[in-house]
Image (cartoon, helix red, strand yellow):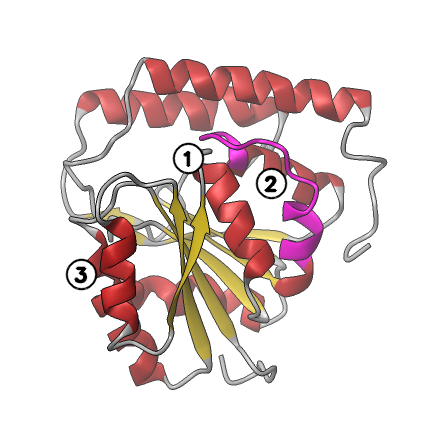
Amino acid sequence: MSNLSPSIELSVIIPAYNEALRLLPTLERLDAHLAAQAPRYEILVVDDGSTDETRAVVLSAMATMASVSLVRQWPNRGKGAAVRRGMLAARGEVRVMFDADGSMPPEELPRLLAPVVAGRAEVAIGSRYAAGAKTDVKQPVYRVLWSRLCNKVIQRSLVPSVLDTQCGFKAFTAAAARNLFASATIDGWAFDLEILALARRRGFTIEEVGVEWKDDGRSRVNPLSDMWKVIREALAIRRNLKRGVYGAASPCGA
C-alpha cells in the first residue's frame, strides 16, 4: 500500500447486525494486522439497527483501538444499506468491505488490494472459486447449493464471467466507491450484484482474486428465504438497468 498517499490510505467497512459475540475478535485481529503494516487506516463498523450489545462492543473497542469508529443506522435496513452507508462515510483512498464474522483472514488483505494498488483494477473481488482460492473446511451442502445458485445462475445476466459475486470481501478505489454506492438502491443480500453490474456498466475495471476463506458455522444465511430475496432483488436490478433507473452508462469517476 506504499503507492497510496492520501491522509487515510485504507478504510475497512464492517457491516454489523447483532454481532456482539463475533465482532470483537474480528476487530482485534484486523487492527493488529493493519497496525503491523503501518498504513494510515480506519475501521468503520456500521451498526445496522442491532438489538443486542453490538454498539457497546464497538464503543469498548474504540477505547483501546484508535482506528475504530462507529456509524449507527436505525432501524435495521439490511447489509447492502449498511455497506453503502460505510462506503460513503469512509475517507480512505481504498475502501474494503469486510464481514464481521472473521471468515476472511486479515492476512488476505494484501492479496485483495494488489490489483488496486498496482493500478490494474478499480474494483477487486475476493473469490472463493478463482485460482488460488482455498477454504479450511467443507461447507454444508445447503450453503454450497445456495452459493452456486447465486454465482452460476442469477448473476449471469448481470455480471457474466465473475465467479463469486457474494463473497463479503471486496475493495474499491475511493472514486469507484463514491460513484457506485451513491447510485445503489438494493438494501439486502443482492447489493453485491447491483454494485458489480453498475461497475461493468460504467466501465470500471474489475479483477477477481482467489483468497483463503474460513466457514463460520454460525452463519445466518437461510437457504430458502434468503435465496428468494436474492432472486427478487436480482430481478429488480435487471428491471432498473432496463428502465434506466441508474442513468445512462457513465464514464469512470463521473
Query: Which residue is under mark 2?
Result: 195
Provide the residue span drawn in magenta: 176-191
Q: Position of residue 57 (x, y in %)?
A: 23, 58
Which amino acid type is shown beneath numbered disc 1? Asn
The residue that appears at 26% across and 50% down in the rendered structure is 54
Q: Position of residue 193 (x, y in %)?
A: 55, 33
Within-10-Å neighbours for mark 1: few <14, some 14–19, many 20+: some
Disc 2 from disc 1: Cα separation: 20 Å
Disc 3 from disc 2: Cα separation: 29 Å
Q: Is residue 208 visible?
A: yes
Q: Position of residue 21 (x, y in %)?
A: 15, 48
The residue that appears at 17% across and 27% down in the rendered structure is 140
User: Helix, strand, or loop for circle 2?
Assistant: helix
Q: Is residue 209 left or right of residue 4?
A: left
Which sits earlier in the primary sequence, circle 2 or circle 1? 1
Which amino acid type is shown beneath numbered disc 2? Ile
Which amino acid type is shown beneath numbered disc 3? Pro
Within-10-Å neighbours for mark 3: few <14, some 14–19, many 20+: few
Looking at the rendered image, the disc whose residue lies closer to the viewer, 2 or 1, is 1
- Give above or below for 181 relative to 177: above
Query: Which residue is under mark 3?
Result: 25
Query: Which residue is under mark 1?
Result: 76
